[in-house]
Image: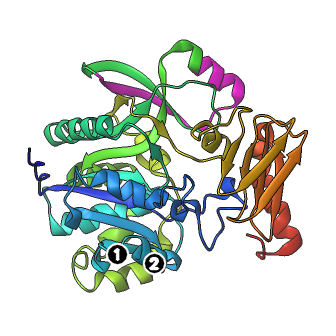
Amino acid sequence: MDTPIPDKHRYCVIMCGGIGSRFWPYSRTDKPKQFLDFFGTGRSLLQMSYDRILPLVRPENILVVTNRRYVDMVRQQLPEIDESRILLEPDRRNTAPCIAWAAYHIAAIDPEASMIVTPSDHLITRESIFEECVTRGFDFVEHHDALLTLGIKPTRPETGYGYIQIGQEIEPGLLKVKTFTEKPNKELAQVFLDTGEFFWNAGIFLWTVDAIKKALHRFAPDLTSVFDRGAHDFGTPRETDFIATNFSGCPSISIDFAVMEKADNVYVECVNFGWSDLGTWGSLYENSHKDDSNNVSCSASVMTYNSTGNIFMAPEGKLVVVNGIHDCIVADAGDVLLICPKSDEQQIKVMLTDVQIKHDDRFL
């Protein structure tokens, strides 16, 4: 049976500009986690993100937004993407400016477009279900004035994710959003889990370009005022120069804070396609194969004695031998060795700050 050709008005924006600091010391400024092959499959997280969107969006309608310092890695890992579809941010300004630029760019090419926005560093294990959910999401936003986010049923009181409180069901599995809460503390996350009314915010969004531009104009006018100055430049050779001159003037703000927490036409599609944002060592541990002692070994030969529940990562060809280590992260990146209890991994960002104070950017 022939695979159906995706709708010509459907686009994908892959956000690929983050540093992934919680995966330090393997995720570094010069090669963030989205460019790494964590699972030994021969494909990085970015490449896996591209692969899973291909059945849903035509290749010529896939865009990558990244920091200009990563353009060579994007070209190397995704040689099939034309340079005109790699949008290079001069500065990191969080997700709202990134999404706004992509929306203005796509609208100039195709005013009838709808778009999915997805991070480049997530893991999705049930890809056929993902395709069904995204297709349904596209159908919904193309027939409703809606901003749609995908929600994941929580399995633990996670403090590293945003939460969505669900409201009235509009269609089976599609509900109105009551509230967004960004990264609650442990006690509040437990309350959210116990109520059953909250879902994790997967950070994957669908909308038409018209709907998101209207929402940005209403709720983030300081952002759209920057892009409106270049209204006639988008989709032309002048766009690159306009962005180089003006992008740094955008406020640094997430799309959740800028729009999703304020708009009244926000909906959530409750999905179950084996999602993890792979934002932490703990999430990598949870999604990796474990040996008989519940240890995980990534790209390393490991010999363990009386050691359980650890995750080990070291350069290929290095032998790691441990005795009496339990529930720890052991990450040897060559110039940096990190040994940290998994329960304390939220402290990695604090450690990074201390490293920068003492050693500047040498180990970042």
284 left or right of 228?
A: right
Q: Residue at x 68, y 53 (%)?
A: 22
Identified by mark 1, the residue type is Pro
Quarter occupied by the C terminus = bottom right
Identified by mark 2, the residue type is Val
Residue occupied by mark 1: 79
Residue 136 vs 107, above or below: the answer is: above
Question: Measured from the top left, where is residue 293 in percent x and y?
Answer: 74, 32
Q: Residue at x 11, y 57 (%)?
A: 8
Question: Measured from the top left, where is residue 40 in percent x and y?
Answer: 54, 56
141 left or right of 151?
A: left
Looking at the image, tell me whether mark 1 or mark 2 is earlier in sequence order: 2
Label ID, residue 71: 2
Question: Measured from the top left, where is residue 298 in percent x and y?
Answer: 65, 52
The residue stretch that appears in magenta = 173-192
Q: Residue at x 48, y 75 (%)?
A: 73
